[in-house]
Image (cartoon, rainbow, N blue to C red):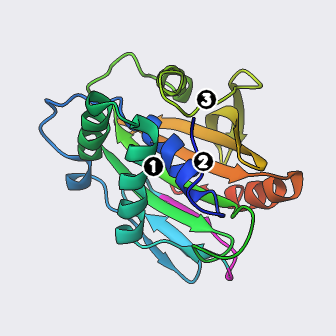
Amino acid sequence: MFKAKNGNGVYFVVAVLMCCGVLLCPGCRKKATEEVDFGIIQDSVYTNQYFSFTIKFPEDWSALDYETQKELTNTGIKVVAGDDKNAKALMKASELQSINLFMVLEKPLGSPVPFNPNILCVAEKIGHMPGIKQGKDYLYHAKQLMATTQLNADFPKDPYTEEIAGQLFDVMPLEMKIPGMLVKQKHFCIVMKGYALDFIISYTTPEQEQVLKEIFNTLSFSQ
């Protein structure tokens, strides 16, 4: 059974993220980090040149740096895989094809709060998987993978499509019980430039969800 590692529930978020980052082909020659830029955050606005998008965060929210994201990812691998050495190896290898673009939390990491609402984005290289044409195709595989781990995620609603920033995203809600709370997520996924681009919001209350959706609605793609 999955257990949260801290009061922020951040390891839970990363654990779910890792399940969505193993649709890789180990034989792919070019790493994701050799193609995609990590992007930058300046004046509370994240900009990514490769995918041509920006998204604005509240000024008092806290963005994690690359090293912290990497540390959390490594912990997420352990949480998801448990004692399964093959699963650990597969998820570790997925780092070659996946890249965490950003992770932003309402409070600084480790703040004394029951849950720390957050939004993150991961890009996974899927050019070697021609059957993944839309976000829902990627989310289908992500859901199947989650079912094989110790996350015990529930999916209260079938994936649906939502238009945001002039783009059609496939949306997958999920829920998971961890000690003392029910954590909810929504994955907003779109396929572009040979990658699955997955924006994930995590929350426990309708008020938190509303704030996160307002942030996500600042997403803008340039032509």
Judging by the rendered image, the residue that carries numbered circle 3 is: 152
Label 1 close to label 3 by CB (< 8 Å):
no
The amino acid marked with disc number 2 is Ile
| Label 3 secondary element | loop
Residue 217, image x and y in percent?
A: 72, 56
The answer to whether any part of residue 20 appears in the image is no
Label 2 close to label 1 by CB (< 8 Å):
yes
| Label 1 secondary element | strand
Residue 106 to residue 80: above or below: below
Please identify the residue farthest to the right as the structure is shown: 207
The answer to whether any part of residue 52 appears in the image is yes
Q: Residue at x 48, y 28 (%)?
A: 149
Please identify the residue farthest to the top as the structure is shown: 131
Q: Horizontally, is 76 left or right of 87 in the view? A: right
Count of numbered marks:
3
Residue 57 in magenta?
yes
The magenta stretch spans which residues? 53-60
Q: Residue at x 68, y 51 (%)?
A: 202
Judging by the rendered image, the residue that carries numbered circle 1 is: 122
Q: Residue at x 29, y 39 (%)?
A: 94
Is tag 1's residue or tag 3's residue first in the polypeptide sequence? 1
| Label 2 secondary element | strand
The image's mark for residue 200 is: 2
Q: Horizontally, is 215 left or right of 6 in the view? A: right
Q: Residues within 10 Å of mark 3 (few under 14, many from 20)?
A: some
Q: Horizontally, is 202 left or right of 38 in the view? A: right
Residue 208, image x and y in percent?
A: 81, 58
Q: Residue at x 35, y 34 (%)?
A: 83
Residue 219, picture quadrant: bottom right
